[in-house]
Image (cartoon, rainbow, N blue to C red):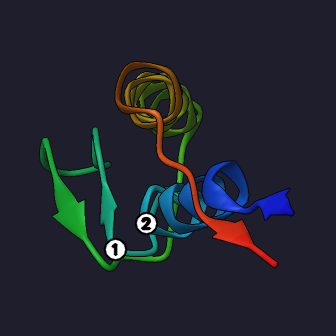
Amino acid sequence: MADWGPVVVAVVLFVVLSPGLLFQLPGKGRVVEFGNMQTSGASVFVHTIIFFGLITIFLIAIGVHITTG
């Protein structure tokens, strides 16, 4: 049996937290910009920290498991 929980959680968080795709924190003109499809070094750093925090919560603290087979 394979555990697909970490893979699914990581892919969903990666898509949702891609800077500029849905939102960008911090934005170029405002604090938060939505759907501008642009990015900056600061926003990449902030989104990386958010990604690390959420994936740690979902995989270690909650323990998401999706098994197949």
Q: Residue at x 54, y 25 (%)?
A: 45
Return the disc, 2 or 1, that comes first in the chain's sequence.
Answer: 2
* Amino acid bearing label 2: Val
Q: Which residue is mark 1?
A: 22
Give the x, y percent position of residue 69: 82, 78
Distance in Å between CA atoms under marks 2 and 1:
7 Å
Residue 37 disc label: none
- Residue type at mark 1 is Leu
Looking at the image, which is closer to me, 56 or 64? 64
Tag 2: Cα neighbours inside 10 Å, few (<14), some, or many (≥20)? some
Q: Quick one: 15 or 39, which is closer to the camera?
A: 15
User: Residue at horizontal 28%, vertical 48%?
Assistant: 27
Q: Is residue 9 left or right of residue 25?
A: right
In the shown orientation, is residue 48 left or right of residue 62?
right
- Asked whether disc 2 touches disc 1, contact meaning CB atoms under 8 Å apart, the reply is yes
Identified at 32% across, 79% down, the residue is: 35
Where residue 56 sits: x, y (%)?
A: 49, 23
Q: Could you say which disc has been placed on residue 16 in the image?
A: 2
Work out which quarter of the rendered image holds the N terminus and state it: bottom right
In the rendered view, would you say 57 is above or below 28? Answer: above
Question: Which mark is in front, 2 or 1?
Answer: 2
Position of residue 20 relative to residue 56, above or below, is below
User: What percent of the width, then of the height, locates residue 20?
Assistant: 44, 66
Residue 34: x percent and y percent?
22, 71
Query: Within the image, what quadrant is residue 43 found in?
Result: top left
Q: Camera-side residue: 34 or 61?
A: 61
Locate residue 50 relative to residue 39 in the image: left or right: left
What residue is rendered at 45% in x and 55% in y? Answer: 17
Instruction: Bin the neighbour count of mark 1 within 10 Å (Cα to Cα): few under 14, some 14-19, many 20 and up.
Output: some
Tag 1 secondary structure: loop
Q: Quadrant of residue 58?
A: top left
